[in-house]
Each structure stands twice: as C-alpha cells, then as structure tokens.
Amino acid sequence: MILPARMQFVMNRLRERLWVKPMIACVLSVAGVALAHLVDSIPIDWKVPEIAQGSIVDLLKVIAASMLGVATFAVASMVAAYASTGQSATERAFPLVIADDVSQNALSIFVGAFIFAIIGLSATTNDYFGKPGRFTLFVLTLLTLVIVVLVFVRWVDSIARLGRLGAVIARVERAAAEAMARRTRLPCMGGMVAFGPPAGLAFHSQASGYLQRVDMDALQRIAAERKLRITLAVAPGALIVCSRPIGYVLPDGQDAGTIEPDLIAKAFTIGPLRQFDEDPGFGLVVLTEIGSRALSAGINDPGTAIVVLNAVYRIFDAWTHPDFGVEPEHERVEVPPLSLDDMFNDIFPPLARDGAGVLEIALHLQWVCGELGRCGDPHLRAVAQRQADEALARSAAALDFAPDLAQLRRRHADYWGPA
C-alpha cells in the first residue's frame, strides 16, 4: 500500500519513537483479554474443552515472570547498539538504527506479552471467565507463547548485527538509495524544473533550521486556486534562515488571486535536523562522515572507507540508469533539480583529503570517479573528472613513495588520459 507523501513522512517520524509500537502492543493485549470475556457473553452453546483455571494461571505466571526481564534485556541491548552507532559510525545514522523494525517489534511483543499476562492473571484468579472464556484465553496464551518464541529467535539474530558498522552503512545506503530513487522518479518532486533567475514576490520562513519536507500538493492547490506560479529557491536538506527567501510567487495573468506568502510558507516543514526521506544528499553526507571517521588516525580503517565508496558508486550508478519516470503532477510549482556538483562536493573532497596519503583509498576513489564518468552523461563526466583531478592533486602532495604516486597516475590516466 502506497501512502500519501505527508502521511508517509509522519509514519517515518513515528517509527523513530520507541514508545509507539509497545503502546500498540499493550492496547492489543488488553483487547485480547477483553475478547476472552466477550466470548462468555455470546449466547451460543460453545462445544469447547474444559480448561482448568490452574493451568491457565501457571502459564500466565511463567509469561509474567519472564517477559519483564526479557523486555529489560532487550532495552539494554538496544541502548548498547545505539551507543555503538554513535561511536563507530556517526550520530546522524541514529534515526535509521532506532527505526529498526525487528528490534522495535521484539520489544513491543515482550512488553505486550507481559501486560497480557498480568491482566489475564488478575482476571482469571478473580473468576472473570466462564468455560468459553477460559478456553479462549488459553488459546490466546498459547498463541502469545509461540509468537514470543519466534520473535525472540529472530531478534537474537538481529541484535547481533544492530549497531555494527557494516549494518549501519547498509542502512544509510538503503535510505540514500530510496531517496535518490524517489528523485529519479520525480526529478523535481513532481513539479516543473526551475530555469533561470527567480522572479516574483519573495516569501520567507518564520523559522530557521533544515528544510525537511515540502508539501507539493498544498502548493499546487494554492497556486491553482489563486492562479499563481510558485518557484522554490530551496530543496529538502537546505539550511533555512529567515533573511533569505525560500521561494517566489508570480501572478499567472490579470485575474490572479491574492498572494498570501505566509499561507504558502506553511507548506514547508522545517526542523533542527535533516531527514533522509526526501533529501538524497543527506544520506551521502552521512556515508562520507562514516568514511572520514574510518580514515582518522585513531581508527585507521581504510577498508570501511572503501566500503563507503562502493556504496556511493552503487547509489549514483542506479541514478544514471533510471528504470522509470513520472510526468510532473504539479505544473504550477517549479523546483530546482538536484545539483551533481553539490552532491559530489559533499562526498569526494572529504574522503580525498583524509585518504590522500593512503594509496588504497586514492586508487579506489579514482576508480569510482572514472566508472561514474563512463555513464554517458556529459555533465556527470565533467563533474567526476574534476573530482578525480582534485583527488590526484591531493595525493600527489601527500604520497612520498614515487612508485605509489606513479601507480595512482596510471589509474587516473586509464580513465581520463595523460594528466
């Protein structure tokens, strides 16, 4: 099921809150006990086995005694994994790790099972159920045990990887690739391409921070109702300040309606942090941070930086081979396209600077730039060659061993010709 963009954005933020799924599990647990009592009130002669109250009580005691400890252990393991993410990768990857569905589902099941056992135990010991109700509660208890066991086994396998550097890189790559795929399908977020210098009445944001989302449907609706054209000056990921305009409004003819910049500005979601949803550049920045940290003197892990460069290559390789495209839906809204120069400047200069004296990194960086330059896009080739030239210049100043530098120059010449 494909959710509307606004709802999807809200759902993604809720996934980053640990209390949401456990709360839902608790509500379902209470509903399960209520269901067992409801069965008693149905005027049907139930042909069900007689379940001894003591057997249900014993099962519920086992669940109640164990699930609280398991839930506490789960929280401790998740907190340790989250702390490991900040130390080994980068704090910017934290929202992706905390949104891990397997861990959240496991914690929710453990807490929900504990609540179910406590409520079911209290109701059973007070003779709250008749024969049908006890049978229903017994079935629900067995089902709870099966679910707990299955979830626990799956969670143990997942928690061993949660917070590990390789898993974090994979999550960041997936988030960046998904955001890039959305921009490939809708290059200007469903709007028209903004050409030339902006014109019209500028409108500003009353808040400062990072632009997280633009409600294109709302902008299109406002523009259509008032016969306006709206040109955005920023895209998701931009740092917004009150003194700089975030867009421009231009009347589309003599019968245009009243321009209300404050109403238009409400379509922009601004927060203190960048989000991965509609900002492909943020995923690339986070990958670069992980690679730069790995190349620091204290860590000295070139292999991780190479993994990051491979991830960057896969993201841009998929971007250069789009499988689909969608016609613009918002013909009255113009949006600046993604800037290759900005994205490449976010990635390659930091890695080239930190890995200038490491031959393996310098060679692999030339390989990534060279292979991307072969995609057939002249603009991408020019941008990639500029980054390759700058990286070569950095390494030429950092490498002391002449044969290493000669090997790097040969790699550069294989793609771009003699320097």
Image: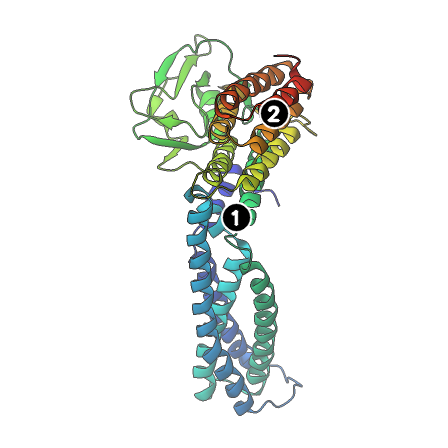
Q: Which is more N-terminal, label 1 or label 2? A: 1
Q: Which residue is mark 1?
A: 165
**Nearer to us in this view, 409 or 239:** 409
Kindly identify the residue that appears in the image at 48 percent across and 33 percent down. Answer: 285
Residue 76 % position (x, y):
43, 64
Report helix, strand or loop for mark 1: helix
Tell me if 109 is positioned left or right of 414 in this view.
left
Coloring scheme used: rainbow
Kindly identify the residue that appears in the image at 49 percent across and 74 percent down. Answer: 34
Residue 216 % position (x, y):
49, 28
> Distance of mark 2 from mark 1, alpha carbons?
33 Å
- Hey, what amino acid is under mark 1? Leu
Res. 377 in view: no
Report helix, strand or loop for mark 2: helix
User: How dense is the environment of label 1, judged by Cα within 10 Å: few (below 14), some, or many (20 and up)?
Assistant: some
Disc ID at residue 403? 2
Disc ID at residue 225? none
Q: Quadrant of the C terminus?
A: top right
- Hey, what amino acid is under mark 2? Pro
Residue 29 % position (x, y):
49, 70
Q: Where 292 sits versus 265, above or below?
A: below
Res. 106 in view: yes
How many numbered markers are drawn? 2
Q: Nearer the viewer, mark 2 or mark 1?
A: 2
Q: Where 277 sits versus 21, above or below?
A: above
Q: Where 358 sits versus 65, above or below?
A: above
User: How dense is the environment of label 2, judged by Cα within 10 Å: few (below 14), some, or many (20 and up)?
Assistant: few
Q: CB of mark 2 within 8 Å of CB of mark 1?
A: no
Residue 253 % position (x, y):
46, 8
Kindly identify the residue that appears in the image at 65 percent across and 29 percent down. Answer: 317
